[in-house]
Image (cartoon, helix red, strand yellow):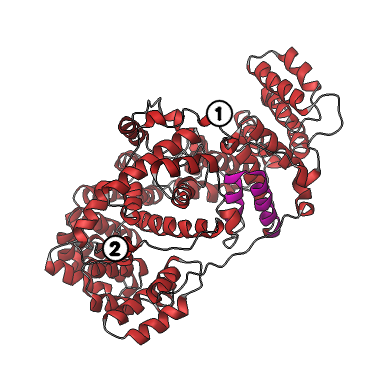
């Protein structure tokens, strides 16, 4: 049961709180001894002057800025003052000056920003030859590429400019206005033809961008082009005319492309009508066997949840011929929901040999054999799977009643391997001391991009030693160091997690596992949909949870605070576990996709499934992987904390879903 929040946290900050929620540095003695060289000012004094210098330049007090800057030349973050100073006058800087600055600060992540700004300046000033001298390879970013190719047009490299212009023009979305002059060049050279405009119309059609299609129609000049555009818009508005169009139209690359995307639009809006029109559509434009199957696959994917038996029969007939493994996976899951084990086996047999040999489908082939009474054959497969760091390997060990085995490795810190990154690591240390976590993360990512695998392992070890939790995780991901559990799964923000583990009666390993999956311990993580902080709470969920806990919620910005985030996230998880009778599978599914969906999936399976089959039958790929990951991460944390390894609880294993 949830305890009253009035009795919680009142004495928290008076205890020995883990302050590393700020990802605060603890020194760099392992790497280079004292972080501060011999100098008149201490690091703290330099840090203070640095902050005052930043404040001065932001209020345009250049006299104060220059004075303070001159006193901290040995401070690790001095290059950022140099950067601020240089960017003030970058519009007037020559290419030579920019190159000198970039060379001086080659190991700094802000070099990309400097390059981009200078490219924009050169383009705005029409200095095309200088732009090409500065940027001799194709840059990243649409506007920069447009300026780059336009510069080539001015330099006389017409073929390259036209090729680049055409590739940028062919987009199903609106293009940056910086490309206008490049497209004018395309037009002036007679290459912006009606055929090219029509080709882009098809891309806009496929991108469901009707406004762009309408705009492009107005750019057409020939009667042929206007006629074709009307056909395109007609099929967009009424895709049910696709079969007639396919039959009556000449077989051309354009018409085949249009027919295919129009048929897909029909499949999305009226799958039953699409089935009726399929044969005439694919015959009309003479698609080959491979293309017909791809078109059929698209429609079959739209029919996965149909309750119409005739449509289901058509779907299954097509799927028996497909090489699309993701569609076959979805079909297997449909049979799992129905607990139709023979059908599960039949659809697994349709999969490719490579897919069938993966741990996932080995597990389910063994389950099919077990359900058919072929226990010895099933157990032999389960036996061959155990000992891997994989959800299905652990599930196989559980089937056999065997002890879980998790392979583990580590890389002891070798300070010498990090010598090339000493200066950058000092900057990370200082940025974290100043609570500039985003900037520190940017520096860290820049370091990782320039490190080999051995160096990444040492960087992970170093970050772990410094309690830079998120950075340690990032290093293991960058280096694909999957066996380095200590660095992949740090015991981060331990005081807070232990406190709320006790208050909510939740296992510490479960809280750590869920937070590791949600944010990788990045305190300022924000998801595309707006979830925030360590346990990735939506502001609305945080507000509602706060009300139920009797805690005063002060807005979404407070969710960056680990104490508040863990308080509310653990409270929400406790509510879900209360709702689902302490079942972590359902609680994790609810945490990720919403409790209403978990309840709906449970109702749909109607008690036909065991725990592993229910997880496999979750229709959302993200949620399915989420539940599997958190269960596995819980095991990893148990191993790291010296606790007995447990996969599912007895009630989770025994329940029917």
User: As rendered, which of 249 and 223 lies closer to the eye?
Assistant: 249
316 relative to 55 in the view: left or right: left
Q: CA distance from mark 2 to mark 1?
A: 45 Å
From which residue to which does the magenta span run? Answer: 454-477
Q: Residue at x 57, y 45 (%)?
A: 470
The image quadrant that residue 296 belongs to is bottom left
Q: Residue at x 33, y 59 (%)?
A: 257
Crowd rating for badge 2 (residues with CA inside 10 Å; few <14, some 14–19, many 20+): many
Q: Is residue 591 above or below residue 657?
A: above
Q: Is residue 143 above or below residue 399?
A: above
Residue, disc 1:
14
What secondary structure is marked by label 1? helix
The answer to whether residue 461 is magenta is yes
Quarter containing the C terminus: bottom left
Prevailing secondary structure class for the magenta stretch in the rendered image? helix
512 relative to 260 in the view: left or right: right
Residue 516 can be seen, yes or no: yes
User: As rendered, which of 433 and 216 lies closer to the eye?
Assistant: 433
Q: Earlier in the sequence, mark 2 or mark 1?
A: 1
Camera-side mark, 2 or 1? 1
Q: Residue at x 60, y 54 (%)?
A: 487
Tell me residue 405's x, y (percent): 51, 70
Tell me residue 642's x, y (percent): 55, 59
Residue, disc 2:
614
Q: Is residue 242 above or below residue 158?
A: below
| Tally of numbered discs | 2
Tell me residue 61's x, y (percent): 69, 13
332 relative to 82 in the view: left or right: left
Tell me residue 253's x, y (percent): 35, 62
Q: Is residue 336 above or below residue 134?
A: below
| Badge 2 vs badge 1, beta-carbon distance below 8 Å | no
Residue 530 can be seen, yes or no: no
């Amino acid at each position: 049961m949830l305890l009253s929040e009035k009795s919680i946290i009142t004495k928290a900050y008076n205890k020995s709180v883990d302050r590393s929620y700020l990802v605060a540095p603890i020194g760099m003695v392992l790497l280079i001894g004292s972080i501060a060289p011999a100098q008149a000012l201490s690091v703290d004094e330099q840090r203070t002057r640095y902050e005052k210098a930043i404040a001065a330049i932001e209020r345009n007090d250049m006299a104060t800025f220059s004075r303070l800057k001159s006193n901290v030349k040995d401070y690790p973050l001095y290059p950022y003052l140099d950067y601020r100073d240089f960017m003030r006058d970058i519009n007037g800087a020559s290419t030579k000056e920019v190159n000198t600055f970039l060379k001086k600060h080659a190991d700094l992540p802000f070099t990309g920003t400097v390059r981009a700004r200078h490219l924009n300046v050169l383009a705005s000033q029409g200095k095309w030859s200088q732009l090409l001298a500065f940027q001799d390879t194709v840059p990243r970013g649409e506007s920069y590429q447009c300026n780059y190719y336009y510069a080539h047009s001015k330099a006389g490299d017409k073929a390259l400019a036209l090729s680049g212009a055409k590739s940028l023009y062919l987009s199903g979305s609106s293009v940056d206005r910086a490309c206008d002059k490049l497209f004018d060049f395309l037009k002036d050279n007679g290459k912006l033809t009606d055929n090219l405009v029509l080709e882009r119309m098809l891309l806009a059609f496929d991108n469901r961008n009707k406004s762009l299609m309408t705009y492009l129609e107005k750019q057409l000049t020939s009667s042929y082009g206007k006629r074709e555009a009307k056909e395109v818009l007609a099929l967009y508005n009424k895709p049910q005319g696709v079969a007639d169009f396919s039959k009556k139209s000449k077989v051309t690359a354009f018409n085949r492309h249009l027919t295919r995307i129009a048929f897909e639009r029909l499949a999305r809006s009226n799958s039953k009508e699409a089935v009726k029109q399929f044969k005439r559509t694919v015959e009309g434009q003479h698609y080959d066997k491979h293309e017909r199957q791809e078109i059929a696959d698209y429609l079959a994917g739209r029919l996965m949840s149909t309750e119409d038996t005739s449509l289901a029969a058509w779907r299954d007939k097509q799927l028996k011929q497909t090489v699309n493994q993701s569609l076959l996976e979805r079909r297997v899951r449909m049979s799992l929901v129905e607990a139709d084990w023979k059908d599960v086996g039949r659809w697994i047999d349709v999969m490719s040999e490579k897919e069938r040999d993966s741990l996932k489908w080995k597990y389910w082939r063994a389950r099919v054999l077990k359900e058919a009474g072929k226990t010895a054959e099933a157990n032999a497969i389960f036996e061959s799977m155990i000992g891997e760091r994989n959800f299905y390997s652990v599930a196989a060990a559980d089937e056999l009643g065997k002890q879980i085995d998790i392979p583990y490795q580590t890389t002891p810190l070798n300070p010498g391997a990090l010598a090339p990154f000493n200066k950058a690591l000092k900057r990370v240390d200082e940025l974290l001391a100043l609570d500039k976590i985003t900037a520190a993360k940017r520096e860290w990512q820049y370091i990782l991009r320039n490190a080999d695998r051995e160096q990444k392992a040492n960087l992970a070890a170093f970050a772990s030693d410094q309690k830079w939790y998120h950075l340690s995780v990032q290093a293991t991901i960058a280096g694909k160091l999957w066996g380095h559990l200590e660095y992949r799964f740090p015991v981060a923000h331990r005081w807070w997690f232990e406190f709320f583990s006790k208050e909510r009666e939740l296992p510490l390993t479960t809280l750590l596992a869920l937070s590791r999956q949600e944010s990788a311990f990045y305190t300022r993580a924000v998801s595309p949909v707006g979830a925030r902080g360590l346990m990735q709470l939506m502001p609305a969920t945080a507000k509602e949870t706060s009300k139920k806990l009797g805690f005063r919620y002060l807005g979404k910005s407070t969710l960056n605070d680990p104490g508040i985030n863990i308080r509310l996230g653990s409270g929400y998880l406790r509510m879900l576990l209360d709702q689902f009778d302490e079942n972590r599978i359902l609680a994790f599914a609810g945490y990720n996709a919403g409790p209403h969906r978990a309840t709906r999936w449970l109702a749909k399976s109607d008690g036909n499934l065991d725990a592993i089959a229910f997880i496999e039958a979750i229709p959302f790929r993200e949620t399915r992987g989420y539940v599997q990951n958190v269960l596995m991460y819980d095991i990893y944390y148990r191993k790291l904390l010296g606790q007995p390894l447990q996969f599912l609880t007895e009630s989770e294993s025994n329940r029917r879903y």
